């Protein structure tokens, strides 16, 4: 056994494994056995399931009976027997949260972790809820919703990176302590992980994810001082932070930190979330620093672009005195901006049943408008929606003549996802057209 391996086995305890998995930016779980026993689930996965840590140690179908009739158990058993990873995007799943059944959509992966004899000893499950992405795809307010999703993703990533859970600690300690199994989990972790040891902060472990971010190979960095082997960090605060963590024992958390990293023969600017966590030996002394790192450059740049686009869209809508609406036929939910809610006298609730909005339309126009909506959603329709109608809300009782324009957006199979569009108040325009002094007979 090499010095690095002995140090790894001594220092990289189950506590560090807990920190690494619990800080994963995605919901993560570990299963074993043909019955798919839940051996570990981080807070993100427990929240996704709508469960608490009491499910640890139970068979999956006992812990989540609502999965009966869904494909997950069969897929997991197939991965267990074949040793082949299974991944899918946008797959539906029915779960129970707060006593209610919900249908959400996920990108998820079942990765088989193999022992030396190439037999599966554990399945690593990561998942990402993409329901919002699916529902709001290509709608007129797409940029606003994507910005919100990115913000939520950033907040969730930071929360998960900083989360420590004693119940998870108890559960993870029941897993095998073999250094090879621990190394396998670290190697396949969805975030960058490295362990530095001693006062010189020698790089003892660096998984593929962090090596890719650093622009280095394993042979370059292992057993080398972090500060020496990464000269691109000179003049940046990273090495100073690492020394402070080693000397004080106080973790350092960075959110959306801008750093220059090695790239080919030069440098590139990257944006990362990171945690520098002190490693304590059995006698309570600091023996090293654990690095957990995720690069979020693309997400942040997208979010900033969306923020700018959204500001431009808002200016255009405000300048034209336009109300915006969004209707989901699958759920019959209807929503709109503040101007629309004011015209219709609706509450500030984000989503309402379409029937509530239709009640505001005057009786002689109501059936015609409902038929126009239904027609626009039919397979033989061109997907365009245009009509004019009168409304009278129960708040100010003012009669308004509105002109509605919209368009239907479809999924990849041609099914209608949403009807999105704008409303314009043309009351005064019609009055002027029909005569400046003529009063309307409503």
Image: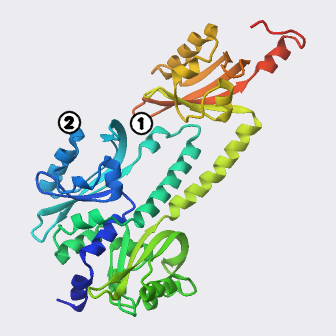
Residue 41 percent coordinates (x, y): 27, 58
N-terminal label among 1 and 2? 2
Q: Residue at point 37% right, 41% down?
A: 104
125 vs 364, left or right, is left
Write the residue at 20% across / 41% down: 65
Q: Quick check: 295 above or below 330? A: below
Q: Residue 419 appears in which quarter of the rendering?
A: top right
Which mark, by number, is residue 318? none
Q: In this rendering, is residue 32 above or below 199?
A: above
Horizontal placement of 223 versus 390: left or right? Answer: left
Foreground of the two, 340 or 111? 340
Instruction: Name the residue carrying label 1.
Output: 412
State the separation of the CA atoms marked 1 and 2. 25 Å
Note whether residue 238 is visible: yes
Farthest-out residue, right: 437
The residue that mark 2 highlights is 69
Instruction: Name the quarter where the N terminus is drawn.
Output: bottom left
């Amino acid at each position: 056994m090499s010095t690095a391996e002995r140090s790894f086995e001594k220092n990289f305890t189950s506590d560090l494994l807990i920190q690494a998995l619990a800080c994963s930016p995605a919901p993560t779980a570990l299963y074993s056995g043909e019955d798919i026993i839940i051996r570990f689930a981080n807070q993100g996965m427990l929240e996704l399931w709508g469960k608490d840590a009491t499910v640890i140690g139970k068979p999956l179908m006992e812990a989540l009976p609502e999965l009966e009739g869904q494909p997950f158990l069969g897929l997991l058993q197939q991965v267990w027997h074949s040793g082949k990873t299974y991944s899918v995007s946008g797959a539906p799943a029915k779960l129970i949260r707060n006593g209610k059944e919900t249908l959400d959509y996920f990108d998820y992966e079942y990765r088989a972790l193999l022992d030396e004899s190439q037999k599966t000893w554990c399945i690593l499950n990561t998942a990402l809820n993409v329901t919002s992405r699916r529902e709001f795809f290509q709608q007129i307010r797409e940029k606003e919703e994507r910005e919100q999703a990115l913000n939520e993703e950033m907040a969730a990533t930071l929360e998960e990176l900083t989360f420590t859970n004693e119940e998870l600690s108890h559960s993870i300690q029941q897993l095998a302590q073999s250094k090879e199994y621990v190394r396998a989990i670290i190697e396949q972790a969805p975030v960058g992980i490295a362990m530095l040891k001693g006062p010189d902060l020698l790089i003892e472990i660096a998984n593929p994810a962090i090596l890719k971010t650093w622009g280095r190979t394993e042979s370059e960095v292992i057993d080398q001082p972090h500060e020496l082997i990464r000269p691109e960090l000179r003049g940046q605060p990273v090495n100073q932070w690492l020394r402070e963590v080693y000397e004080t024992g106080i973790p350092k958390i960075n959110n959306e930190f801008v750093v220059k990293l090695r790239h080919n023969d030069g440098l590139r600017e990257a944006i990362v979330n990171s945690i520098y966590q002190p490693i304590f030996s059995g006698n309570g002394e600091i023996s090293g620093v654990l690095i957990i790192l995720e690069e979020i450059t693309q997400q942040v740049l997208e979010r900033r672009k969306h923020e700018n686009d959204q500001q431009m869209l808002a200016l255009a809508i405000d300048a034209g005195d336009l109300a915006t609406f969004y209707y989901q036929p699958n759920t019959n939910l209807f929503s709109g901006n503040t101007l629309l809610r004011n015209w219709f006298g609706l509450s500030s609730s984000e989503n309402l049943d379409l029937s509530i909005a239709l009640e505001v339309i005057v009786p002689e126009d109501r059936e015609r408008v409902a038929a126009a909506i239904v027609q626009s959603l039919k397979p033989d329709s061109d997907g365009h929606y245009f009509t004019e109608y009168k409304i009278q809300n129960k708040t100010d009782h003012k009669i308004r003549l509105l002109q509605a324009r919209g368009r239907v957006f479809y999924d990849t199979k041609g099914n209608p996802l949403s009807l999105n569009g704008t409303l314009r108040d043309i009351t005064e325009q019609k009055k002027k057209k029909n005569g400046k002094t003529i009063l309307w007979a409503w």
